[in-house]
């Protein structure tokens, strides 16, 4: 390993299984908080999304609703979650000015996946144990046979939200707790999330001067966009540890899954990511489309992204042997 | 553990999120001022509970919102146990 890549790895806040199993909060201490979260961020958007579909014969979505849903998808799932919550904050894959970091945190909050500091704590612990006991959302720890597989899928996809022990942010995300600006932005999660539901309603209502347009804006670009986005990200946790190609020997079950690459902004090159968690790019070959990384390169061109970390040097060797 | 030892443990637990060495942190600095979110407070109380061998109600990190006040409360809990 070159001195250069060693430095890059040192800067990433990573934990190993040697750090131990503790540093979690028993889930029973947070039952009220997590049921409130699931109700607000999962149940309400799901009900809204089903309502949107049921209302199609009477109130079909406008072109503006579809455009807003797609734009908010790119901004929240792509920029907010993949580029921001995941690469910038969980892995410190690049650096960006505080103002950009705050905007990205707000966009990530609009994806309804919880406050930044909690998401980052969970994700760093996921990499610490990856598919071994201690991983908050592995599909491989629910017993043998078909029933274990099915229960594992459900756990990794959604069930873990209600049952896992919570990684202690004091241990897993002290860098973010200490950053007063990001800390405050993270704690306003609910405000940003509700803003993401309300803005499309406001825009639709104002543009068409009608309450009906405000409603479809809310239902399609707010609720349905959130509900599908949650399914997408939880699929990285479930499907991308069960199906796909395991190119790199990462010691876990992370997979590369091509058909999810575009909607996930590159997240589904998940085996590549586990091979080199601190790297900003998730694609390794020219055909492995990674829209999130394209966004980071765009930020770089604009002078707003520095110290973009490359994949671990062993990648080249492993790629050559496959 | 006495009050001072509990205070030291709390400040040591916070060492990654404060700007000064743990032994220099004023014991009456509030958890609010340190920017502790609710889950971090529960985490702190969980760690403290593990250290003293007794589960502590997470609400206590709100009701007794500084290293000193939390330490006084926990020391009283422990004292009450050893007396009974």
Image: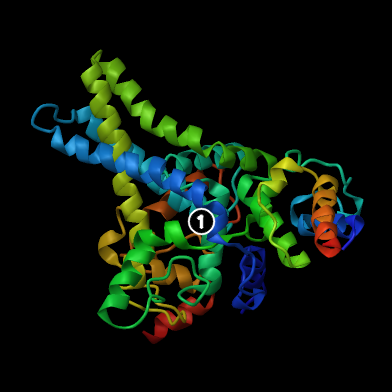
Residue A1 lies left or right of residue A190; in this view the side is: right
Residue located 87% across and 48% down the image: B25
Residue located 76% across and 38% down the image: B33
Is A247 placed above or below A272 here? Answer: below
Residue A136 lies left or right of residue A200; in this view the side is: right
Q: Chain of mark 1?
A: A
Residue located farthest toward the top when viewing the structure as drawn: A209
Residue located 64% across and 65% down the image: A23
The x and y percentages for residue A228 are 29, 47
Is A104 placed above or below A169 here? Answer: above
Is A68 placed above or below B77 here? Answer: above
The x and y percentages for residue B38 are 62, 46
Image quadrant where residue A63 sits: top left
Residue A162 lies left or right of residue A232; in this view the side is: right
Residue located 79% across and 40% down the image: B30
Specify whether residue A309 is in view: no
- SS at badge 1: helix
The x and y percentages for residue A235 are 33, 60
Quadrant holding the N terminus of chain B: bottom right
Image quadrant where residue A246 sits: bottom left
Residue bearing mark 1: A87
Quadrant holding the C terminus of chain B: bottom right
Image quadrant where residue B22 sits: bottom right
Q: Which color scheme did the rendering employ for the protein? A: rainbow
The x and y percentages for residue B83 are 86, 62
Specify whether residue A180 is in view: yes
Is A83 placed above or below A251 here? Answer: above
């Amino acid at each position: 390993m070159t001195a250069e890549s060693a430095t890059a790895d040192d800067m990433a806040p990573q934990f190993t299984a040697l750090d131990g199993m503790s540093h979690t909060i028993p889930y029973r201490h947070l039952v009220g908080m997590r049921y409130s979260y699931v109700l607000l961020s999962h149940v309400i958007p799901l009900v809204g999304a089903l309502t949107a579909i049921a209302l199609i014969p009477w109130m079909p979505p406008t072109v503006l609703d579809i455009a807003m849903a797609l734009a908010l998808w790119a901004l929240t799932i792509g920029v907010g979650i993949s580029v921001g919550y995941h690469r910038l904050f969980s892995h410190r894959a690049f650096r960006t000015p505080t103002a950009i970091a705050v905007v990205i945190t707000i966009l990530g909050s609009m994806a309804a996946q919880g406050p930044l500091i909690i998401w980052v704590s969970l994700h760093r612990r996921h990499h610490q144990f990856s598919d071994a006991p201690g991983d908050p959302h592995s599909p491989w720890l629910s017993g043998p046979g078909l029933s274990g597989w099915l229960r594992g899928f459900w756990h990794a996809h959604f069930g873990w939200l209600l049952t896992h022990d919570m990684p202690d942010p004091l241990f897993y995300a002290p860098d973010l707790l200490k950053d007063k600006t990001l800390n405050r932005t993270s704690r306003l999660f609910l405000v940003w999330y509700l803003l993401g539901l309300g803005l499309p309603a406001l825009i639709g209502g104002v543009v068409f001067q009608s309450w009906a347009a405000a409603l479809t804006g809310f239902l399609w670009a707010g609720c349905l966009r959130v509900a599908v986005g949650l399914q997408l990200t939880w699929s990285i946790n479930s499907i991308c540890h069960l199906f796909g190609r395991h190119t790199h020997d990462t010691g876990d079950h992370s997979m590369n899954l091509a058909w999810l690459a575009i909607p996930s902004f590159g997240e589904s090159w998940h085996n590549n990511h586990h091979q080199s968690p601190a790297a900003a790019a998730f694609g390794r070959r020219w055909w492995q489309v990674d829209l999130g990384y394209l966004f980071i390169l765009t930020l770089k061109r604009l002078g707003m992204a520095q110290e973009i970390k490359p994949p671990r040097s062993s990648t080249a060797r492993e790629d050559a042997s496959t | 553990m006495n009050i001072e030892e509990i205070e030291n443990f709390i400040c040591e637990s916070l060492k990654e999120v404060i700007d000064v060495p743990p032994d220099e942190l004023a014991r009456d600095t509030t958890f609010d001022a340190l920017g502790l979110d609710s889950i971090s407070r529960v985490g702190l109380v969980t760690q403290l509970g593990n250290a003293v061998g007794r589960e502590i109600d997470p609400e206590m990190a709100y009701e007794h919102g500084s290293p000193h006040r939390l330490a006084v409360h926990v020391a009283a809990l422990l004292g009450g146990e050893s007396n009974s």
